[in-house]
Amino acid sequence: MNLVEKINKLKKEKNAIILTHCYQNIEIDEVSDFVGDSLYLSRAAAKTNADIIIFAGVYFMAQSAKLLSPSKRVFLPNMNSGCLMADMIDVNNLRQFKSQNPDIPVVCYINSTAEVKAECDICCTSSNAIEVVRSLNVNKVLFAPDTYLGKWVEYKLKNVEVITFNGFCPTHLRIRVEDIENARRRYPDYLILAHPECHSEVSKLADFVGSTKEITEFAQKSSHTKFIIATEKGVVDRLNRDSMKNNQGKTFVLINDNIVCPNMKCNTLEDILYTLENENNEIFIDTNTAEKAKRSIEKMLLLSERK
Ligand code: 13P
Ligand code: SF4
């Protein structure tokens, strides 16, 4: 039996599912039950009947799955898969941020730890950040940890001041205005699709800004055939694979060769098999934190489910 066959066999025996973020190594899709962005995977985690969830993503994603499915056992195949942005803020930093800006609702990006989520009013992902902030119906919010997603929300909503914590994604910040300008010169007939974690000046120059899933859906539905993608390489790999598979004749080019999140690439098929066999790297969250953090994610899910 090869690795994929061994994993699929064990999945069945243990009633396990594999949730995979679209920045993961593409071969992991072969054993995955769901592949998508943070919001899609959170919903899948909340609804599953499986006993075991293997989360092929980064640590905060596995934690969110555990928060939403506390009775399930959740595992991260490789514990080195942390999100550098999520690690930029801890509870003490958040408390300080709040005390410097008292009495303002706090929105936290899902790219944060359970401890941070527990002290925020509502969670958001890159798919629904604008909708979440709008739903609060206030003229000022605190937003943590991603300063650029927060600024993007402010730019789009116009009438809400978004005070941001100074976190950022080192991978997306490797995309520069010059990359966009060069791409426009070199590929004048390509559309540029960007993730809102990019620097604000980059996002403003793109033709479309959205989460990984929104970028994928936009590209698939578009009558356009050529795209420059300004987010992590995993999205480009999947778009090119699917276009080839479905004979769509679409071309997707990564904005620059360095847009690879090293932490997202830590999980391998070998790690997944090892975790399924040995049940190592299980995620645990203390009950008090879990209860509060879950509330902020559930508020978000409720809001975007109404759509
Ligand atoms: P999505 O919410 O688009 O999946 O993005 C998660 C992420 O970590 C982007 O860097
Ligand atoms: Fe975190 Fe950036 Fe990697 Fe996304 S791409 S997981 S925000 S470090």
Image: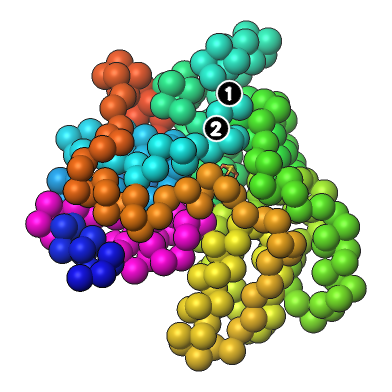
Query: What residue is pinned by disc 1?
Result: 89
Residue 102 location, quadrant: top right
Compare residues 180 and 141 and report the one nearer the observer: 180
User: How far across and how far down the image is residue 254, in percent?
Assistant: 68, 67
User: How far across and how far down the image is residue 8, in percent?
Assistant: 21, 64
Residues under numbered marks 2 and 1 in contact, where contact means CB atoms less than 8 Å apart: yes
Compare residues 109 and 246 and report the one nearer the observer: 246
Q: Is residue 218 above or below residue 17?
A: below
Based on the picture, tell me whether residue 25 belongs to the magenta stretch: yes
- Three-letter code, disc 1: Ile
Compare residues 3 and 151 and report the one nearer the observer: 3
User: How far across and how far down the image is residue 184, in percent?
Assistant: 85, 71
Residue lying at 53% horizontally and 38% vertically, measured from the top left: 83
Q: Helix or strand or loop: what does disc 1 sit on?
A: loop
Q: Helix or strand or loop: what does disc 2 sit on?
A: helix
Q: Is residue 304 above or below residue 215?
A: above
User: How far across and how far down the image is residue 107, in percent?
Assistant: 55, 30
Q: Quadrant of the N terminus?
A: bottom left
Q: Is mark 2 within 8 Å of ligand 2?
A: yes
Q: Is residue 272 left or right of residue 177?
A: left
Residue 234 location, quadrant: bottom right
- For the view shown, which residue lies furthest in the front direction? 1
Residue lying at 47% horizontally and 60% vertically, measured from the top left: 25
Magenta residue span: 12-41
Based on the picture, tell me whether residue 75 belongs to the magenta stretch: no
Query: What residue is pinned by disc 2?
Result: 86
Compare residues 285 and 219 and report the one nearer the observer: 285
Residue 215 location, quadrant: bottom right
Q: Quadrant of the C terminus?
A: bottom left
